[in-house]
Amino acid sequence: MKNLFIIGFILISTGIMARPNQDSLLLKIDRRNQEIIGNPSNSKKSLKEELQAIFAKNGIVLEDSLWQSIRKAVQADTEKDTAILVTVGGKNVNIRLNQSSFSETKGQANTKSIYSSSPTNKQVNVGLNGVHVKEGNEEVHVGWNGVQVKEGDEVTRVIWGKDTTKIQAKDRNFYQRKGLNLYLGLNGASANLPEVSIAQFPAPLLSTDFTLKPTGSRFVGIEVARSIRLGSGNKSRFNLGYGLQFDWYNFMFDHNRIVQKGQNGVIFQPIIDSNGGETVLSKNKMTVSYLTLPIMPHWTYSKESAVQMFGIGGYVSYRIDSYTKAIEDKSGNLHKTTSNLFINQIRYGVRAEFALKHFPDLFFSYDLSPLFEIGKGPEVQAFSFGLRLL
């Protein structure tokens, strides 16, 4: 494993520094016989002497550190073909280590010289997924979980830590609730707003103040999910899901009264125009964002089942932002205010999730805690429902 790590480190360092339009030197080594495949003089020289001669012929020097890495890779106790990609003296050197010349020639009696020096076009991409180097039908990818070298249909991998691709066959057929999840849906509110009978215009609260536009009130959540198995059977698994999530409530009001923070609590007030009437608003919403810790016990079933996952659990959230945004219909004037609006800092509730075959996953969430502080705003509890994607 140490030898493989050295190879992976070489791939990382050289993959990042690789530059296009450089000469390349391709060498293939028979690991079993410790000789360069196709070199007519390999019977008279050691592997190191062969490499030194070829390097000198191409105007570069075989450094001792590179030779030590090659020697360790040749002596590594593995049956897989490996590769080393380095840059020496402005020249890309691609060294392939094969089990034997027989596997390379696929049983042919004679082999052709396989080391060459020629100009090449190399594509190097560096991004969040890692470093990817491509040259013809050869590719090297250095990612978060290791290094992958691909030559045609032949793939060699060096894995850091646990190999997440090695999932037992009995588990691969079961639904997995983990990774990055995107929640998209609609939200609403169950409100208890009594009619205001005092003689005041405009009134601070009305029973219609939490009337929402059905398709305009949207919910968005981004979750990084993990899962722990608590029990298993032949046809189902019982797991505990957890993670970290960012949520956004967008309450799109279906009236022209803007929610505001008053001295003693929340009030809804219109913008009075020059004629003493309410200004018509093309957009009138309140947005609240949370950092959420979901806890989701769930059952998973075979991917061939009609129901692949069912879960019911809860969540606890911390408010990180809240604001109002209103746009006048005629003038287009924007009114935006950032305020806590007496919204509860802590939110908690229950959530149910369903995964069905050939259908996007579904979710439903209901806040058990009131949206506003007690005595500071209307008695409102929010809920959301929609699709869980990714």
Image (cartoon, rainbow, N blue to C red):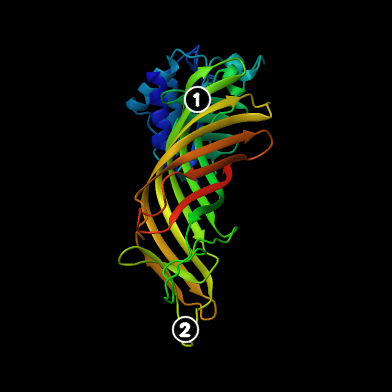
Q: SS class of the residue under badge 1?
A: strand
Q: Is residue 332 above or below residue 189?
A: below
Front residue of 190/138: it is: 190
Q: What residue would you read off at disc 2?
A: 273
Residue name at image x 65 percent, y 30 percent: 307
Kind of residue at disc 1: Asn
**Residue 160 is drawn in which quadrant?**
top left
Q: SS class of the residue under badge 2?
A: loop
Q: Is residue 55 left or right of residue 119?
A: left
Residue name at image x 43 percent, y 30 percent: 55
Between discs 2 and 1, the one toward the N terminus: 1
Q: Residues within 10 Å of mark 2 (few under 14, many from 20)?
A: few
Kind of residue at disc 2: Asp
Quarter the N terminus occupies: top left
The location of residue 153, given as percent across then percent down, is 63, 27
**Eye-nearest disc, 2 or 1:** 2
Q: Which mark is residue 239?
A: 1
Front residue of 383/24: it is: 383
Residue name at image x 45 percent, y 61 percent: 286
Residue name at image x 42 percent, y 14 percent: 75
Q: Report whether residue 159 is seen.
A: yes
